């Protein structure tokens, strides 16, 4: 497509209205449909080769693999088929049509064959995720599948490798369905809530969501190929992409609502609402604020309030969810979604109107820019909604190596865009070559370092800490002090801490902090290790020093507050906690505020704050420890013991939770509340008296 565009005259009118080559209709008819048949057969073989492994893992049918591969190949080759049909009836447009059809064939083949693959590690696509081995959970999945008249899918575990594991689940692999759940789903939700999320994902199998999602990109391609006969290539892409963005979101929202209802009918409306409320509470996109209103107006998933409102409206009287939903908020979200829909329809109509009637090149360019803006708006809003967290993560990672390749890539992609306005075909071709070279340099730069980082992250995610130690021993230069990579050294210290070697991990992090004072992940982990070892003075000193470098990072104020509370300085701890709360509303900050309120004798505020903390960060380790401490100080012994056991269960499942100090404190409080053991009377009778001992 690029070479075809740059070979045309530089006049904008010729760029937007391509002159059609001529050829023999019969010859082009044979060539076009020959490419369609050959393309389908080749894609069929490729799809079978891609899907044979996941099919064997799930013990699926090979005949179903062939059938699904053929259907996906047909979807992938559909744009080329439409182009061949257009070339048959319009032989004067055969070259641009077939060029577009072949390009879209490659794109749709790449997007559709993913529905045959098993989910793999994000950082290492060569390794499939491990299987879930919990027999109770697998038995429950089988029960839910039978209830929804489905075959039980193969279930894989996505380990988060974090002290705050993600809570997600998704379905994939059309020929042999595979369910993927994160470790946070197993750790942070109750069994019934976990079942509701699993039933939602099984609903995607029941309503054939995967097939509809697989057909979305071919729909985009077919739309563009159809528009090529009436408008320019660039404007056709913009119209087709705008059409795809809107249709995908409309279809996805309907499917999500349907899956919610299927899960509620299988598990219960009350449990499903509770599970969805917790999942949205742990999501990176907030449920409040104007930006959240805009994001969910254009997102592929409905907002929390919209989903819960639909379930509450359809729930039977005896299964009514006990959740507060603001009717005003729901109405505002519906209005904003309607406004987004009207803007999309108006923009699409403007694009079609411009394409179907003769327009000047400047007018087409303006419409192209407007449609491009509409198309990227949903993704832009998502980035803006997460911008503060992205900036925070980037600030913590400052001081690492490997940013130069990203700079080269960012500069390279602008070469052909800027060269387009020179109207010089030679400059455009040269800029395209430079862009390709820059992309290759960016990909190959420090490739061995990226591979090593991938291996380390995968080992940490699977809790294979000895593997990280082995990689460090085999690559001493990459892990060396002063010259080694900061992220590798940090992950090595994290692996040692996960193995229980806190002394060596602390020493490594102290050295890293001294050598790379801008790399704030080191003091962040180091403070947690010091607090875990009851070294509150050093934790306070470190959190204060790191907080001065990142005054907008609430984590260091939270750590300062915890250290001050450990030192018995309640007033100063409250001040630090209040400063953290001004920066962000976080469940851990609310939990610490509840503990400080209890320390000051305010039981009412403590109970209110811990309830808010549970809603904001359900299943979070520190929040559970704070809830257990409050239960030991304010509630009955039975509920306190249950709360302490929940903390121990979560700590045992996640070695990245450094809660040893909190657990020791909870054990001391629990021991103090337990009644003294009774001494049998027969033992008392034979105890020697004081006089006898004298």
Image (tube, grey):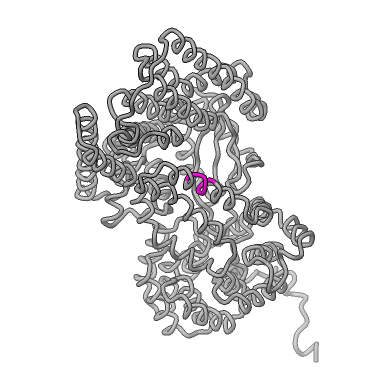
Q: Is residue 227 left or right of residue 388?
A: left
Relative to the observer, which residue lies in front, 526 or 40?
40
Q: Quadrant of the C terminus?
A: bottom right
Residue plotted at (53% across, 82% down): 540
Asked if residue 575 is positioned above or below residue 99 in the image, the reply reads: below
Residue plotted at (75% across, 85% down): 689
Residue plotted at (41% across, 70% down): 594
User: Could you tell me residue 575's position as x and y percent?
Assistant: 39, 81
Q: Is residue 462 left or right of residue 209?
A: right
Residue plotted at (38% across, 33% down): 8
Q: Quadrant of the N terminus?
A: top left
When asked about the image quadrant of residue 673, the answer is: bottom right
Q: Is residue 513 magenta?
A: no
User: Could you tell me residue 374's position as x and y percent?
Assistant: 28, 43
Q: Would you say residue 672 is visible in this rendering?
A: no
Relative to the observer, which residue lies in front, 50 or 207?
50
Main SS type for the magenta part?
A: helix
Q: Would you say residue 197 is visible in this rendering?
A: yes
Which residue appears farthest toward the bottom when viewing the image?
694
User: Could you tell me residue 441's position as x and y percent?
Assistant: 59, 52
Asked if residue 555 is positioned above or below residue 132 in the image, the reply reads: below
Please give the range of residues in magenta. Answer: 432-436
Asked if residue 513 is positioned above or below residue 62 in the image, the reply reads: below
Relative to the observer, which residue lies in front, 440 or 501?
440
Instruction: Count the labels in the image.
Output: 0
Relative to the observer, which residue lies in front, 453 or 556?
453
User: Could you tell me residue 83's position as x and y percent?
Assistant: 40, 19
């Amino acid at each position: 497509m690029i070479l075809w565009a740059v070979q045309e005259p530089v006049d904008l009118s010729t760029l937007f209205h391509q002159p059609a080559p001529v050829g023999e209709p019969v010859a082009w008819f044979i060539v076009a449909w020959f490419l369609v048949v050959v393309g389908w057969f080749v894609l069929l073989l490729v799809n079978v080769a891609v899907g044979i492994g996941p099919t064997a893992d799930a013990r699926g049918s090979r005949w179903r693999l062939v059938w699904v591969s053929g259907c996906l190949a047909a979807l992938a080759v559909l744009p080329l088929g439409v182009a061949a049909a257009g070339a048959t009836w319009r032989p004067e447009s055969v070259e641009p049509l077939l060029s577009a059809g072949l390009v879209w064939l490659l794109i749709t083949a790449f997007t559709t064959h993913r529905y045959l693959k098993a989910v793999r590690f994000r950082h290492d696509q060569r390794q499939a995720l491990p299987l879930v081995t919990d027999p109770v959970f697998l038995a429950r999945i089988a029960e839910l599948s039978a209830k929804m008249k489905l075959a039980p899918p193969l279930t894989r575990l996505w380990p988060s490798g974090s002290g705050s594991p993600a809570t997600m689940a998704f379905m994939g692999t059309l020929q042999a369905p595979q369910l993927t759940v994160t470790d946070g789903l197993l750790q942070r939700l109750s069994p019934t809530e976990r079942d509701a999320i699993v039933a939602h994902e099984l609903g995607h199998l029941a309503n054939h969501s995967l097939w509809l999602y697989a057909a979305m990109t071919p729909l985009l391609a077919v739309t563009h190929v159809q528009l090529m006969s009436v408008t320019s290539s660039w404007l056709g892409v913009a119209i087709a992409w705008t059409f795809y963005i809107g249709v995908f979101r409309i279809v996805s929202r309907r499917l999500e609502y349907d899956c919610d209802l299927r899960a509620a009918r299988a598990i219960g409306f009350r449990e499903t609402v509770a599970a969805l409320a917790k999942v949205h509470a742990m999501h990176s996109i907030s449920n409040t604020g104007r930006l959240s209103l805009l994001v969910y107006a254009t997102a592929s998933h409905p907002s929390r309030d919209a989903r819960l409102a639909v379930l509450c409206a359809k729930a039977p009287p005896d299964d009514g969810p006990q959740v507060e939903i603001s009717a005003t908020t729901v109405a505002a979200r519906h209005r904003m979604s309607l406004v987004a829909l009207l803007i999309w329809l108006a923009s699409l109509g403007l694009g079609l109107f411009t394409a179907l009637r003769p327009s000047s090149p400047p007018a087409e360019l303006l419409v192209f820019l407007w449609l491009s803006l509409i198309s990227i708006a949903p993704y832009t809003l998502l980035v803006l909604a997460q911008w503060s967290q992205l900036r925070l993560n980037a600030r913590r990672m400052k001081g690492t190596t490997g940013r130069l390749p990203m700079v080269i890539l960012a500069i390279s992609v602008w070469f052909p865009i800027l060269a387009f306005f020179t109207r010089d075909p030679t400059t455009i071709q040269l800029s395209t070559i430079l862009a390709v070279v820059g992309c290759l340099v960016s990909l190959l730069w420090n490739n061995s370092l990226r591979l090593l980082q991938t291996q380390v992250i995968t080992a940490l995610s699977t809790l294979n800490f000895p593997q990280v130690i082995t990689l460090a021993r085999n690559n001493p230069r990459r892990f060396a002090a002063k010259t080694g990579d900061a992220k590798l050294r940090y992950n090595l210290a994290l692996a040692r801490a996960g193995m229980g070697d806190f002394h060596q991990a602390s020493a490594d992090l102290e050295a890293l902090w001294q050598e790379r004072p801008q790399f704030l992940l080191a003091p962040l982990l180091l403070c947690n290790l010091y607090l875990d070892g009851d070294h509150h003075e050093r934790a306070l000193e470190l959190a204060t020093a790191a907080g001065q470098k990142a005054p907008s990072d609430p984590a260091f104020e939270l750590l300062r507050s915890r250290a001050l509370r450990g030192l018995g300085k309640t007033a100063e701890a409250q001040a630090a906690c209040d400063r953290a709360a001004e920066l962000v509303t976080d469940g851990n900050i609310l939990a610490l505020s509840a503990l400080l309120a209890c320390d000051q004798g305010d039981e009412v505020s403590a109970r209110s704050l811990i309830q808010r903390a549970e809603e904001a960060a359900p299943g979070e380790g520190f929040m559970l420890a704070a809830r257990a401490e409050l239960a030991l100080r304010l509630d009955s012994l039975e509920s306190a013991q249950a709360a302490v056991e929940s903390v121990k269960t979560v700590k045992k499942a996640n070695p990245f939770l450094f809660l040893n100090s909190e657990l020791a404190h909870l054990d001391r409080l629990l021991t103090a509340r337990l009644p003294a053991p009774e001494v049998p009377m027969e033992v008392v009778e034979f105890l020697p008296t004081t006089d006898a001992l004298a």
